[in-house]
Structures are given as structure tokens and as C-alpha cells.
Image (spheres, grey):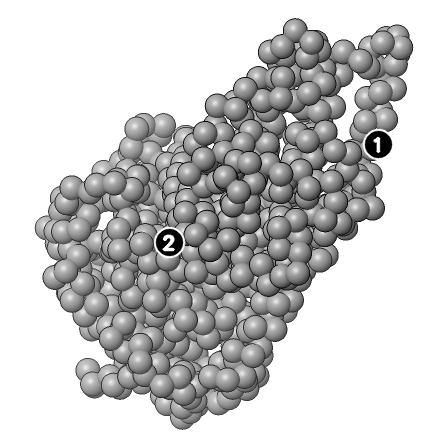
Amino acid sequence: MAEPHNLTDHHTIDHTTDRTTHASSLAGHADKPAGNNELKHETGHGMHEEIQHEAHNEMRRETHHAGHSSHSGHCGNGHRRGIAALFDRHDSTVDFEEGDGDALAPVTEQTAPGSADSCCCHSDGARVVFIGNPNVGKSSLFNAMLGMHAKVMNAPGTTVLLEHGTYRYVPRHGDTAALAQEWDFTDTPGTYSLLPMSPDEEVAVEAATGAKGHPQPDLIVAAIDATNLSRSLYFLAQVLELGRPTVVALTMTDLAAKQGTPVDAARLQRALDGVPVVAVDGRVGEGCDELADAIAGALESGTPMPRGLAERPVAGLTMRQWVRSRSDERFEWAARVLSDVGMGSESGLTLSDRIDKVLLHPVWGIVVFLIVMFAVFQATTTLAGPAQDWFDVTVRGWCETGIDWVFGLFGPGASDGWFHSLIVNGLLDGIITVATFIPPMGIMFILLSLLEDCGYLARAAFVMDRAMRALGLDGRAFLPIVVGFGCNLPGLAATRTLPDSRQRVLVGMLIPFASCSARLSVYLVLAYAFFEQYAGLVVFLMYVMSILVILLVGLVLKHTAFRSLAPEPFVMSLPPYQYPRAIALVRTVVGRLWGFLTGASSIIISTILVLWLLEGIPLAGAAGGFGTVEDVHDSAYGAVADAVAPVFKPAGFGDWHASAALITGFVAKEVVVGAMSQSYSIEQSDDESEAQEGQGALGAALRQDFDESSGGHGRAAAVAFLLFVLAYTPCLATVAELRRQFGGKVAAATVGIGLIVAYMLAVIAFQTLRLVL
């Protein structure tokens, strides 16, 4: 086979049928000039050269594994201490030449439904695994077929997310009732090869081969991209050689036709010697019924092995040995298939190429990216604000009026009891708190889907890759962190765009340190109370500190719990630009929003009910009855605040008012100022701004208490309090979302790290500033 082109780092290959970007290949090359990121176009290459380029990509993948194994091949097997022990063993790249799991799973090996080895509860139906390269429309197809019936869960022993669901197939002809079937569908992370480079790709391979706790698939649906057929065919060859019945889902056919390289599904099926090929479009649901018919036929009759390919051996070879052993044959087979389907040898500039000249430019690309990020930030804060206020004020008012009316039916005194307080101040408070997060989360999900579906998100990752490489992250990590400065919750939602589960966990642990807009009210009140002339500067410095804390904590985590997250070759596909489809957009947004509501609401409401209970238990004779305590200091909540207060004495604010506000702030930072006013028995006015509160009665009370608790160093104590508010747990909803996405251990570790960092910052700041303030 001819020698492949020598592709350098920071180089982009662009063909009509093969479009791959190489960026920032190794940490040692990070000092290369930014100009090397500019998109370069090459035209006039034949289809055999496209296969040669794909061969080079595969060789880079194998070379990376060989080099990586020398320094990290054993890192997953060593004894891990401290926070690293909280994370699963899949946070390191797998060396497929070591360990018991390297041998390919035998064809006959099966995992019983519902057994301990199964990653989820299955029905008795056939198991169908969806697999494909990133950005080929595989997940859109999966969601189009299952609708709202898919469930997201972790793969066995990992933080990698898999989607599962049951599909009921009813034949469109014959005795439909007698022939109806139920199949278990599993959607896997995108992977470019069966030789994985990340935990996500590893899980995809394990799901397709039935290894490491995954049930054996009865059929594989391989999604291939009609606009990147050369790359897709090599991957398809690996999948076909697994020996499982396989159905090919051909995506992006409309875009391939627009680019002048149409792919006919029937002709491709003939070139594959009868392997079923179905043209699909998951964004609008086209081809889903035909794909289901093809799956049913393949499950019944099997699928042929195309000429030029050979079924994998039952045992005896590691994954890498098997992939390497037949790489040349697969490339030759892919070249023959391309020739059989009539792919032309000429390629030219497409509309996507012309747009990329701007969006991937080393200067203009960054400008456009910052504009897009600003728009996303503004949308999740400015646009969501009125909707949040509507839930918090209008909807709450309607609900309270209705509740009062119902209680009024039982007599004039019914609304004065503890049960009314439980419903209004406990249960309703929890429901409204959950509801106020619907607008920012919904807006973020809509924007993420738009950016992802139109193809820009992949470009944004390429543009920002260099900036994020210091933390071992790729450019996609920049978006969640930026969004986190508006609201941490949609920032966590944005981590779903990251391709590597280790990156998702690390970024998810850093987002709570992004100073969200809810903290701003606390900054303003204390800034105007203690630093009236320099209030604006103080608030600005808090945001600067937030950035520094993110960088510091990120570097510490990178060198401890995430040591294996080293910079890797950044190779990704740039999908062609396309218009998002409204139906698919709505389906995706509603599904993600429903997942958040069902996953986080119980935790939020339960915790608020616990706080209500503490505030409603009187501890003094004259405090009032249960649920109607007049002074919060006389309740169990006040006792807890008194018990916690001495802990903050080294930070200068060892007073129960401050500790009570911090405890309430764990639920939501928006209520910290209100909790302070309540503890001082100061009436809040809706027309009073944070600046006026800081300069008024609340500010005076804060100055007096902080001066007393700090020994006359109130301003130093105020700075320490601000730093603690900046770094400790942002809100209960964020913790609930961390737990939902990454599990309880990661959520607990994030809360613990936040408390430790916040306390250290507060103590150091107070003990230092008390010498000068």
C-alpha cells in the first residue's frame, strides 16, 4: 500500500468525503504558533488517497497507545489514595495488551438478563447496540426511535453515560399482534475505531463486544456518515468483522447530495454484498420504520460477511492485535466499496469549507467564539431572569392564594397552624425552587442543541483547544465553565458536550467555583456595607478570584485525582453545517429537562423540608408553637447555627447570624441576603436595591456584628465571608445535578473540596488582611 501523507500537527485535511481536524497533538507542541491552526484546503485527491489518510489516522491512534502504555499502562492497577479513590478505574486510557479483559469476548458468551453483570435491567427481547463515529447522527436516530422512553445510566463501573430503552416493534404487514417484538436498545458514545483512546470509546467497544459486564449484543446498528464515507467504511469493516448481525444506518444523505457526492443506499447495500443499508435522518424520523424492518429481518436471518473481510477469531488475540492484523485488508476493502458505489475522485470547496475559513481563523475564529459565548451567557441570565421571577412571584402567589382558599374551607384558624406552614413554607418553597431552574436549564439545552446540530460546537472546541490544554482538557470544556458564571446548573448541563467522561467529571467539579449570578447579591450588599467607595472594584475582584480558584483547583486535581488526564492528540471530525430540525430539537430539550426535574427535584424538596422542620422546632418556652416559631434564633435551626459559628472564628465571622445565612445559602445563594435580614429582624423591601440594603439597616447590623466577632477587623472579616461565599457549595440544585450526572461520590467530593477551599481562603484572607485593615 502506498505511504500515507505525512500529516503534521495543527493541520486540517479537508475533502468532500473526508473531513478531519488535527489540533494541538501533543503537550510538547503547545508552543507552536497559533497561525498553524488555520484551515488548509487540498483538492483533487483520489478516493485511494482518502483511504491512505484514514490509514494514517489509524496509525496515529496505534502509535499513541504504544507510547502511552510506557507511562500510564499500569496507573489503573496501582493503589490510589485520597480523593483519587473516589473515582472509578476507567479514568485512565486502557492499554489493550495487558489485563484479563484484553482478549476478545467469545461469540457464544452470553450475559443473562437481569444478572449482576448486566448494566441495566433488560427485557427478554433481543439486545441491539447502536455504534458509530462522533457527529454522525447516531444519537439523534436512537432518540427518534425511542422518543421519551430512553433512560440514561452509567456503564458498569464507570462514569460514562449510556442510554438504554425498550423498543416495541410491530410489523407493518401480516399478523402484527402475533409478530410483535420488544428489543433492548443501547446507544454508545461515539468512537472512531475499535481501538479506543478514551474511557468513553472504551465503553462503546465493550458494549459492542459484550465485555466487562456488558451483555452480548444480538445485533449491531452501525451508523455511518454519507459525507465521510471513506472514514466510515474502515470503521464499518471492523464492526462487520465482529461477526454479529449488522444493519447499516446511512446518515447525512441529504448533505452528501448537496455536496455533489450522493450515496445511494441500495447501491451501497449491493457493494456490501447484501448487508442491509437503510438511509435515515434522525432529526425528522425518516427511515426509522425501514430501519426497524431491517433489524427484524437481520435478527431472523442474520447478515452476510462481505467479500474481503473475515470474522474475528473467538479467542487468542488482544483487541490491538486483532485490529492491526487486518488493517491493510480493511483499507483495501473500503477502497473497493468506494469504487463500487461510484465515488468520484474530484473534491472541491463546499459551503462548510468557506464558512470555516472564518470560524477556524486564528483571529476571527476567536472573535466569533467570544461573541457566541457572550450570547449564550446573556441568554442564560438575562432571558431566564424574568421567567424565574414569574415562577418565584406570580406562580407562588397563585399557589399560596389557592392553598389559603382550601384551608379557609376548614375554618378561619386553619391557616395559622403548622400544617399550613409545612405546605407553604416547606413543600411549596421546594417546588418553586425547582421551577425557577426550568428557564435557565431550558434555555441552555436549547442553545446547546442548536450549536451542536448546526455544527458549530465542534469548531468552538477546535478554536479553544490551546487555551484549555493546560488543564488537560480540550476546547469544548470552555463552554460549560463560561456558562457557569451565569448559572452553575446549565453549566453542568453543558458538560454533556464533552467527549471524555474524565473531562466531564473534572469540569463538573470546577463549575461550582464559577461565580454565578446568584452570588452577586451577596457581593453587592457586603461591598456597599464595608467598602462603599470601592464597591465596584470589590465585586470585580471577586470574579477575578473565581477564575484564579478554578485554575488553582483544576491544576491540583489534574496532578492528583486526574493524573491520567494528560494532553492527547486532538483529532475530531468537523461535521458539515446544517439547519437544526425543530422536532428533534424539541424532543431533545424536553427529554433533558425532564431528566433534570425527575433527578434533582426530590433532593431539593427533601432538603428544604428538613430546613423547614429545623426552623419550626421551638427550643425556648416563649418561642411559639411547632411550625410557628417567631424568632429563628429560638428554633433548632438557630441552635445549629450557634453550634457551627465557632468554626468560623479563625475567619473573623464566628457569629450565628453569618453561619445561619451560610447554612441557608447551601440551598440557594439568592436567599443569603434574605436570611441575614430575617436573623436581624429587618424587614426587606422589594423596591430596595442591594446597594441600598448595604448602606441601610442591614449594612449597619452587619458592620456591628462583624466588628464584634473579628475583634475590630470587620472589613477583613467581610472579605473572608465573601471568599467563603464564592468557593463553597453554590446551591442544592447544583449538588443534585452533580449527583445525577456523576454519582454520589463525585458530588460529595465536590462539596467537600468546595468547603475546604472556601474555609482555607477565608482564614488566610482574614489572618492576612487583619494586619492592614
In percent of the image, x 22 and y 54: which residue is there?
94
The image position of residue 600, as x and y in percent, is: 56, 35
Image height of 414 relative to 712, above or below: above
Q: Of the residues tagged 1 and 2, which is closer to the observer?
A: 2
Identify which residue, 228 or 436, lies in the foreground.
Answer: 436
Task: Name the residue rendered at 49%, 73% in the picture.
Answer: 459
Q: Where residue 602 sits in the image (x, y, percent)?
A: 57, 29
Res 616 quadrant in image: top right
Residue 194 horizontal/vertical position (percent): 28, 59
382 to the left or right of 502: right
Check if mark 1's residue and mark 2's residue have beta carbons within 8 Å.
no
Q: Is residue 568 left or right of residue 283?
A: left
Residue 10 horizontal side relative to residue 432, left or right:
left
Tell me if residue 548 can be seen: yes
Where on the picture, by quarter, is residue 171?
Answer: top right
Q: In the rendered structure, which amino acid carries the disc numbered 2?
A: Val
- The residue singled out by tag 2 in the image is 553
Which part of the image, by quadrant, shows the N terminus? bottom left
Residue placed most toward the observer, 461 or 118: 461
Q: Residue at x 25, y 85 (%)?
A: 6
Q: Is residue 149 visible?
A: no
Three-letter code for the amino acid on which mark 1 is drawn: Trp
What residue sits right under mark 1 in the picture?
Answer: 398
State which tag comes first along the sequence, 1 or 2. 1
Alpha carbon distance from label 1 to label 2: 44 Å
Q: Is residue 357 above or below residue 105?
A: below
Element carrying mark 1: helix
Q: Residues within 10 Å of mark 1 (few under 14, many from 20)?
A: few
Residue depicted at x 29% and y 66%: 567
